[in-house]
Image: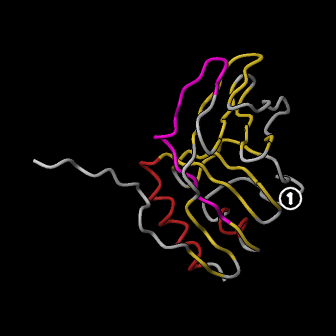
Amino acid sequence: MGELARRGPLEGVQPIAHANTTITVGPPMARAIVRGEGARAFGIELPTTVCRAIVQGERAALWLGPDEWLVLAPHPQEIEGTIIEISHRQIALIIEGSRAATMLNGACPLDLHPSAFPVGMCTRTVFAKTEIVLWRTAEQRFHLEVARSFARYVYDLLREIAADTS
């Protein structure tokens, strides 16, 4: 009996492009939940400002709670503090373009106007019935972290919303 090949939940999907907005699968990356005061991970300082992210080079740390951060990096590196490695659990979708916030609001209840959700802001929220981490990385660009088991659902729902948004 041969070995089963491991496939990603969005392997082979094509980017969604509609109304000057694109949705693509983010690159593979190391992910970790870091807990504890004075923690450091992947060589990056952790933000202390509520619902904000810090980016240093290719690494990012997103504040999720008073002592909890989501840390993203291209490759695992030295980690200090209590950590749960979650690279296998989540996948990223990148929503970018002039209609990105409108498409996300098709199933996300947050006010995504730049005055309410500025660049650098991040939070846990829902997209339809799925928990996500949403991070605004640029004026018209969002990074969405979703559990692999819900990735296809979120991707397909975004495709439907894109088709309905003109």
The front one of 127 and 78 is 78
- The percent coordinates of residue 1 (x first, y second) are 9, 47
In the figure, is residue 90 to the left or right of 68? left
Whether residue 81 appears in magenta in the rendering, the answer is: yes
Instruction: Residue type at mark 1: give it.
Output: Pro
Which element carries disc 1, helix, strand or loop? loop
Left or right, 126 with reference to 120: left
Instruction: Name the image quarter holding residue 62.
Output: top right
* Residue 153 forms part of the magenta stretch: no
Name the colouring of the figure.
Answer: secondary structure
In the displayed structure, 8 sits above or below 147; it is below
Residue 113 position, x and y percent, is 83, 60
Task: Name the residue: 51% across, 59% down.
Answer: 154
Q: Nearer the viewer, residue 62 or 161?
A: 62
Name which quarter of the figure residue 83 lies in: top right
Residue for point 62% across, 31% down: 77
The one of 75 and 29 positioned closer to us in this rendering: 75
The structure residue drawn at horizontal position 70% and vertical position 67%, both measured from the top left corner, is: 96
For residue 99, above or below residue 53? below
Residue identified by numbered label 1: 114
For the magenta stretch, what is the residue range? 78-95
Query: Most prominent secondary structure in the magenta stretch?
Result: strand
**Quadrant holding the C terminus:** bottom right
Figure check: 11 above or below 117: below
Q: Position of residue 16 (x, y in %)?
A: 56, 74
Residue 162 sits in quarter: bottom right
